Image: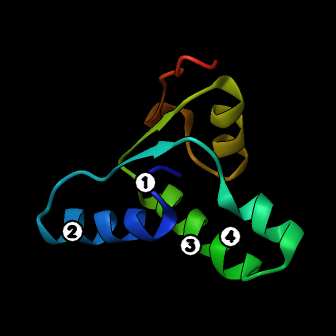
Amino acid sequence: IAPALSAALLAFLVARALRRPFWLHLHRLSGPATARTGLGARLVRRLEDALLARADQLSCVSDAMVEAAQTRGVPRERMLNLPNWAN
């Protein structure tokens, strides 16, 4: 998630307080990485899932990220694929 997960949470709260759409840009998911380390994996996964579920629009940097978001329950119609230079 870009910006960082904590910043994304703050952006969500501000967007809701101001009654504005919440757009999340998905560069990578933190949950799988934290699951390997065991450091707060459950909390990170739950926070990511909550933000993904509540995003009004989700942009992804690759087809793989679109698929990853879909496996996490995000409807395809709320997603845009905006590949970066590396993809």
Q: Which of marks 2 and 4 is nearer the N terminus?
A: 2
| Quadrant location, the C terminus | top right
- Label pair 4/3, CB-CB below 8 angstroms: yes
Labelled disc at residue 3: 1
Q: Nearer the viewer, residue 54 or 82?
A: 82
Q: Position of residue 68 (x, y in %)?
A: 71, 42
Gap between marks 4 and 1 measured at Cα: 16 Å
Question: Whole-Å distance between the Cαs marked 1 and 3?
Answer: 14 Å
Determine the residue positioned at 64% across, 44% down: 69
Task: Residue 35 in the image: state x and y as whole percent.
Answer: 83, 69
Which mark is drawn over residue 45?
A: 4
Q: Which amino acid does label 3 sit on?
A: Leu
Q: Which residue position holds label 3?
A: 47
Marking on residue 14? 2
Disc 1 secondary structure class: loop
Residue at figure coordinates x 30%, y 63% from the top left: 11
